Image (spheres, grey):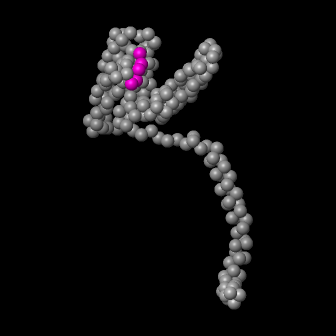
Amino acid sequence: MAKMMEKLKLEVKPAKDAHLPRARGVVRVIVTTAVSLVGLCGLLSTRMGAEFIPSLDEGDFALSINRIPGTSLTQALEMQKSLERALLKIPEGKEVFTRIGTAEVATDAQPPSIGDGYVMLKPRKEWPDSRKTKDDIADEIIDTINSYIGNKIELSQPIQMRMNELISGVKGDVVVKVFGDDMDKLLKAGQKVCRRTNSRTRRGRSKSRTNRRFAISHN
């Protein structure tokens, strides 16, 4: 065994003598690189969970409709029909339909003032202007929605809207919930959040879109 170890040392010694001085010369580089990588990993760990994930294009739009509580079914139907006629004027739209209130199978109970609408688009080859993007159509839908008073409608996508509702209980992508017992303080805090966030979401509207809904809840 001793003879084998001596033989191994003799075979390894030339390679060791040849490469060891070179390795000693790059120790500083190796240590600097290792420290930099550790620091970079520490920085990335502070941003975990905040990475941007682009939305999947589902091809159609979903509308989360909220009107003044206490709106009658007759009035809600009239308002919705008027809005649907306006949305159908968008040339890329194929059909528009809405579910208002609670269905016969009450799996999603909600009053007549709340509904879920859907804007189905034509195939892209049938669009009058093939250069138009889906964001451009979304801007047209938002402008149409904003021209009608009494409708608080959030634009989203069918599956995306339902997934958001299952995850957080709210159909919006970004939700701010304010908890407490004093309704006056809750209202002031909610309005303050709305003002600050709305002032930011208005910037660069043509480049990006943020659908946000603010729910003021209390225990």
The N terminus: image quadrant: bottom right
Q: Vertical placement of 13 versus 146: above or below? A: below
Among the 4 quarters of the image, the one containing residue 119: top left
Q: Which of 147 and 171 is in front in this view?
A: 171
x and y, in percent, of residue 112 in the image: 39, 15
| Residue drawn at point x = 38 percent, y = 28 percent | 62
The answer to whether residue 110 is magenta is yes
Q: Vertical placement of 50 versus 14: above or below? A: above
Q: Vertical placement of 80 versus 17: above or below? A: above
Q: Which of 6 and 128 is in front in this view?
A: 6
The answer to whether residue 176 is magenta is no
Q: What stretch is highlighted in magenta?
A: 107-111
Q: Main secondary structure of the magenta part?
A: loop
x and y, in percent, of residue 219 in the image: 59, 20
Mark count? 0
One can see residue 143 in this view: no
